[in-house]
Image (tube, helix red, strand yellow):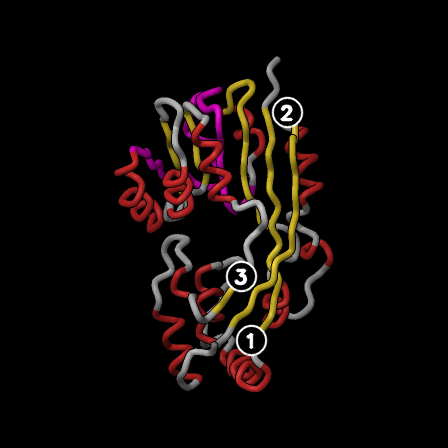
Amino acid sequence: MTANGTFEDLVAEGAAVPTEGWDFSWFEGRATEARPSWGYARSAGERLAGAGAALDIQTGGGEVLDSALGRAEPAGPLSIAATEGWPQNVAKATALLRPRGVVVVAAPDDAPLPFADAAFDLVLSRHPVRPYWDEITRVLRPGGTYFAQHIGPASVFELVEYFLGPQPDEIRGGRDPERERADAEAAGLEVVDLRAERLRMEFHDVGAVVHFLRKVVWMVPGFTVEAYESRLRALHERIEKEGPFVAHSSRHLFDARKPVR
């Protein structure tokens, strides 16, 4: 279903919606994305149920961790912390997660984690900018688990390349799961399970595209409506004539363990 409105109305709406956090409910009826078969929030909740001390890295607005905690039935006391690097998200995550007893810590994505060695028996992350493998290994207790959903190679590149043109192989091949497996193992983790899926996405109107590119800022770096007005107008006309713009997200699930020495 395409939202009603002129090109100008749809673009203005997509440009006005707040982008804080990882709540994608605004897209309902305007864009869709198939979900991975493993159900990350549900699976993370199952892991949390058996944990004593857990850390969620790059929690965003805390929505995914909140959902996972809502599904968890801890067997005993659970101490949990979360990190986030974007100040607007830190405030949002703190407000959402504090009632669940989660301590949210402001920490840059590329800096060492502000926790002691072997502090956690479970580390979670959904869509980290870059997995900092040495730090993940350091804060895990022996026998502890890293359980995460990563963005895979060439994710939503149909949309990226619509705006930026064909991308070189080294960029298309970034975030390769096998390369990440090798990096995790080099940092001292044992990869217990690694699964990858490519999933269909549909954008039903140009306003949804504008909001998506404002929210997921690394897709088209420096994106503004003004800079890409002609491409957006052409995309609007294409959607009006041919139907939804189709792309594919790429996701992989990591289940890794720190060995007991």
Q: Which is more toward the observer, 222 or 184? A: 184
Q: Amino acid at mark 3?
A: Glu
Indicate which disc, 1 or 2, sits on the residue closer to the N terminus: 2
Main secondary structure type of the part rendered in magenta: loop
Direction from residue 62 to residue 121 in the image, left or right: right
Q: Residue at x 47, y 76 (%)?
A: 1
70, 139: nearer the viewer: 70
- Is 78 situated left or right of 44 in this image? left
On the image, the x and y values in percent for residue 110 come to 50, 40
Task: Work out how far the residue at label 3 is from the one at label 2, CA to CA, in angstroms.
Answer: 34 Å
Q: Which residue position is annotated with label 1? A: 244
Query: Which label was assigned to residue 188?
Result: 2
Give the percent coordinates (x, y) of residue 102: 32, 34
Picture quarter containing residue 134?
top right
> Residue shown at 53%/29% (left/top)?
135
Q: Which mark is residue 212?
A: none
Q: Pointer 1: residues within 10 angstroms few (<14), some, or many (20+)? A: many
Looking at the image, do the residues carrying marks 3 and 1 touch, with CB atoms under 8 Å apart? Answer: no
Mark toward the start of the polypeptide (3 vs 1):
3
Residue type at numbered disc 2: Gly
- The spot of residue 154 in percent (x, y) is 65, 57
Query: Mark 3 — residue?
Result: 33
| Numbered disc 3: secondary structure | strand
Number of the front mark, 3 or 2 = 3
Camera-nearest residue between 154 and 196: 196
The image quadrant of residue 26 is bottom left
**Considering the numbered disc 1 on the image, is that residue within a helix, a strand or a loop?**
loop
Q: How many marks?
A: 3
Amino acid type of the residue that numbered disc 1 sits on in the rendered structure: Pro
Give the left or right position of residue 161, taking residue 54 as reference: right
Task: Using a 10 Å C-alpha cutoff, classify the residue at mark 2 as few (fewer than 14 neighbours), some (14 to 19) or many (20 or more).
Answer: some
**Residue range of the region highlighted in magenta in the rendering:** 101-130
